[in-house]
C-alpha cells in the first residue's frame, strides 16, 4: 500500500488504486489560498465505495502540513456504521499509519447534528448470529487500530455520538465536544452490551461508578458536562468542536514529530505495566527514541538563537 505522500499533487486529478478492495477510489483535489487559517493548499482524499463516498480523508498542507482530517459522510443514515463504512474507515487508517509525514489526525463528521449514531441496526437485523459476531470483532479491531495509531488522534464531536459512535471517540486520544453533543452507550436497551471497546475504555477515563452508570442504564450526557466528568478534554460552544480540534492539532503539529510518537507510546504502553521497573525501562526506551535525532539538536539550536524550531521528523 502506498503512503499518502506518494500520491501525485497535481490539481484536480483522479486516481484509481489497484488493491484488494475494488470498491475504493482515490480523489485528489488541490486548492490554493493565501493563509493558514482560511483556505490553503489542501489535498482531499475521499473513499468512494459503491460509488458514494462515506469516509473522507483530507491531508492539510501549508503551515498545517502534518494534520489529517477524517470525516464520516453518510448523511441519510446519520453516519451509522455499516459494513461498507467500517471497511472504508479501516482503509483510511491504513493510509494514515503508512504516512510518515502525519503528525495528528482529527475525526469528525460532515453531517449536521450527528457525529456517529452507532451501528447500522437496519443492516444488523439482516445478520445471522455468526455475522453479528464477526461484525463486532471487525469493529473492535478497527477502533483498536485507531487507538494504536502512532500519532495523536482527536474526536471533534458535535451532535449525537451514541453506541459505536461514542466508542469511536473513546478510541481517540482527545475528545472535544460541542456543548450540545449527546453522548451515550444505549446498548443494554437493545439487549446487548457495548462491544467495540466501550466497557474497557470508558472506565479508564471516568470513575468506575460513572462508567457502570452510563453503560448499565444507557443514560446520556450532554457535551457541556463531558469535560467535568472526564469524558472530554474540552467542552466548547456548539459548532466549535472542529475549530478547537484544529487549534489543538496546530499546537501538536509544532512539536517534534518523533517526540510526539514516543510520548504517546510511553503513556499508552506505560499504563499497561504495573511493575515500576519495567515501566521505567519503557520510558527510557521511548526517551532514547528522541535522543539521537536531528530534531533534538534543532530544538537546542533554536533555543540559543531565539527562533522557532523547524522540525523534520529526523
Image (spheres, rainbow, N blue to C red):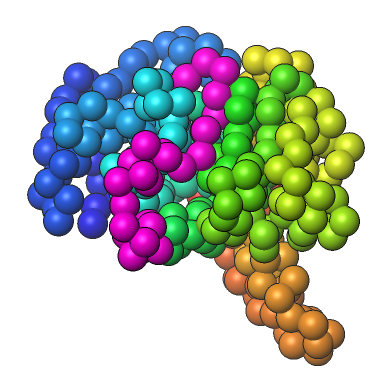
Q: Is residue 59 above or below residue 279?
A: above
Task: State the image coordinates of residue 311 (x, y, percent, origin top left).
Answer: 57, 47
Q: Residue at x 44, y 30 (%)?
A: 79
Q: Front-most of 118 and 244?
A: 118
Residue at (17, 29) in percent of width and height = 51
How many marks the image carries: the answer is: 0
Inspect this view and state whether residue 229 appears. yes
162 shown above or below 149: above
| Residue 211 in the image, given as x and y percentages of width and height | 79, 53
30 with respect to 69 (left or right): left
Q: Position of residue 106 (x, y in %)?
A: 54, 36
Q: Is residue 114 magenta?
A: yes
Does 290 appear in magenta?
no
Report the residue at 30% width, 21% height from top. Answer: 30
Splitting the image into 4 quarters, where does residue 192 fall? bottom right
Q: Which residues are magenta?
A: 110-135
Q: Quadrant of the N terminus?
A: bottom left
Comparing 42 with 202, the one in front is: 202
When the figure is inspected, residue 48 is found, relative to residue 281, above or below; the finding is above
Q: Residue 165 location, x and y as percent?
A: 55, 40
Instruction: State the residue in front, 61 or 119.
Output: 119
Q: Residue at x 40, y 26 (%)?
A: 77
Quarter-of-image position of residue 138: bottom left
Q: Left of 168 or right of it: where is 200?
A: right
Residue 99 shows up from this direction: no
Image position of 80 (left or right of 21): right
Q: Is residue 15 above or below residue 83?
A: above
Amino acid at each position: 500500500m502506498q503512503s499518502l505522500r506518494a500520491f501525485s499533487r497535481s490539481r484536480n486529478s483522479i486516481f484509481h488504486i489497484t488493491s484488494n478492495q475494488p470498491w475504493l477510489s482515490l480523489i485528489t483535489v488541490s486548492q490554493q489560498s493565501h493563509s493558514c487559517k482560511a483556505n490553503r493548499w489542501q489535498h482531499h482524499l475521499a473513499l468512494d465505495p459503491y460509488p458514494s463516498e462515506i469516509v473522507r480523508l483530507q491531508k492539510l498542507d501549508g503551515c498545517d502540513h502534518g494534520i489529517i482530517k477524517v470525516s464520516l459522510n453518510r448523511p441519510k443514515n446519520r453516519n451509522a456504521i455499516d459494513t461498507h463504512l467500517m471497511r472504508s474507515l479501516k482503509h483510511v487508517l491504513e493510509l494514515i499509519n503508512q504516512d510518515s509525514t502525519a503528525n495528528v489526525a482529527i475525526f469528525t463528521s460532515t453531517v449536521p447534528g450527528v457525529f456517529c449514531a452507532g451501528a447500522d441496526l437496519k443492516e444488523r437485523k439482516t445478520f445471522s448470529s455468526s455475522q453479528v459476531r464477526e461484525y463486532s470483532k471487525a469493529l473492535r479491531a478497527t477502533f483498536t487500530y485507531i487507538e494504536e495509531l502512532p500519532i495523536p488522534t482527536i474526536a471533534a464531536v458535535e451532535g449525537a455520538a451514541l453506541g459505536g459512535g461514542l466508542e469511536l471517540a473513546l478510541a481517540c486520544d482527545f475528545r472535544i465536544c460541542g456543548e450540545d453533543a449527546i453522548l451515550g452507550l444505549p446498548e443494554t436497551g437493545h439487549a446487548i452490551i457495548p462491544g467495540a471497546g466501550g466497557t474497557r475504555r470508558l472506565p479508564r477515563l471516568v470513575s468506575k461508578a460513572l462508567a457502570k452508570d452510563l453503560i448499565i442504564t444507557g443514560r446520556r450526557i450532554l457535551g457541556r458536562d463531558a469535560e467535568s466528568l472526564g469524558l472530554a478534554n474540552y467542552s466548547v460552544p456548539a459548532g466549535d468542536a472542529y475549530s478547537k480540534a484544529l487549534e489543538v492539532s496546530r499546537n501538536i503539529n509544532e512539536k517534534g514529530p518523533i517526540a510526539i510518537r514516543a510520548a504517546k507510546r510511553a503513556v499508552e504502553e506505560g499504563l499497561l505495566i504495573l511493575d515500576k521497573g519495567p515501566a521505567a525501562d519503557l520510558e527510557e526506551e521511548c526517551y532514547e527514541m528522541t535522543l539521537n535525532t536531528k530534531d533534538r539538536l534543532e530544538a537546542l539550536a533554536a533555543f540559543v538563537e531565539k527562533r522557532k524550531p523547524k522540525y523534520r521528523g529526523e
